Image (cartoon, rainbow, N blue to C red):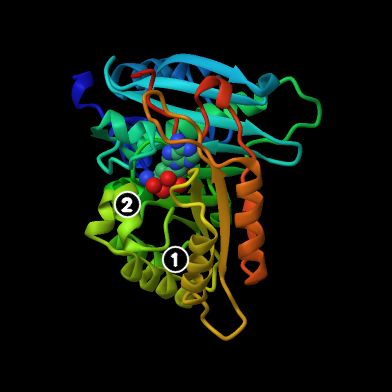
Amino acid sequence: MKDRAPAIHDMSASEIEALLREWRQPAYRARQIYRQLYAQLAAAPGEMSDLPAALRERLAQEVRFNELELDRVQTGDGGLTRKALFRVNGGPPVEAVLMIYRDRATVCVSTQSGCAMACRFCATGRMGFRLNLTAGQMVEQVLWAAREARAAPAPGKPLLTNVVYMGMGEPFNNYDRWWASVERLHDPEGFNLGARNFTVSTVGIVPGILRLAREKLPVNLALSLHAPDDELRSQLVPVNRKYPVAEVIEAVREYTDKTSRRVSFEYVLLQGVNDQPARAQALARLLKGTATRPGVRLCHVNLIPWNPVPGEPLKPSERQRVLDFQAALERHRIACTVRVQRGVDIAAACGQLAGGVQ
Ligand code: SAH
């Protein structure tokens, strides 16, 4: 029985209403449940104190909660970074990272366990693909982070303000479920997170970028570029052979044309590999192609000093090379920031998520 029951976080408000109708419960009960899940952040029926005991019992019996099992939480940066390791059915690992800042709190969410993209410098890529997460499993990661942010002992701390799909996996290889999770979390009747508070990062899956350009909710797009030329990019990011740089840039251009939203380009800096002055020049030239009108450049470059991955001989660029690369882009009036890393000590930084596989 319980195996065939739906997972609660995969159900929309109207699906919960339909289920409660089947149970001959009044409609306001469905709304209570939905509010418990997404406003009160109840993790289990037992916490839904405004429901009659019999209904809590029935929910617990017939509807699945916690499709992700929390295995452990590690904290770094003095408690301001928290990484959760979850498992699906006791097996495939899924990680989420909460980062608390003075004025905001961001959760980095996984869309798959593992990843099939095999980017040379990424720990998740080395672990290979395990499975696609459901929308509900993505939503559960966000609700975990929201509960943690609420419980964090810092005075005046922010509640969860941003969701970035930058954990394990390639979101656009799991597009429908990924988008369903955005719609759920955006729902003003529930979690109510503004569309602009979501960011999705892609390795450059062109059909996904074009699809996002047509969506109604204006979520932010980040693109993992890492090299301006096909020769090097194909070595670092193998899917570049399928979707080469020019096609990716063209798709981004279509996205900026349609949405007028600025795109972030992520660029992991690897000493002596992609951090030469000539590559900074080539990158600047390439990004000029994203301008929709002369002088309006809807792009921003995030430089990420590479985070070491066990067994990988690559090296992060030295500080001076990072600064030189940044200065070269700025000379071409390309907006550019060096990403401040969080969670390196607990293997929670960009590209380090592998569920303890290493
Ligand atoms: N598959 C998506 C989502 C992953 S996001 C994508 O490729 O965009 C994770 C970001 O961290 C990507 O920009 C990725 O290229 C980058 N990254 C991967 N490994 C890294 C590492 N070891 N150090 C720093 N950044 C890394």
Nearer to us of marks 1 and 2 is 2
Q: Amino acid at mark 1?
A: Lys
Q: Is residue 243 above or below residue 82?
A: below
Rendering coords of residue 223 (x, y %): 44, 56
Q: Which residue is mark 2?
A: 172
Residue that appears at 58% across and 35% down: 39
**Total numbered labels placed on residues in the image:** 2
Give ligand 1's quarter of the image. top left
Q: Nearer the viewer, residue 207 or 349?
A: 349
Instruction: For ligand 1, tell me if the residue under mark 1 lies within 8 Å.
Output: no
Residue 180 in view here? no
Rendering coords of residue 306 (x, y %): 51, 39
User: Quick one: quadrant of the N terminus?
Assistant: top left
Q: Is residue 133 above or below residue 261?
A: above
Residue 208 in view here? yes
Residue 216 circle label? 1
Residue 127 placement, left or right of 346 = left
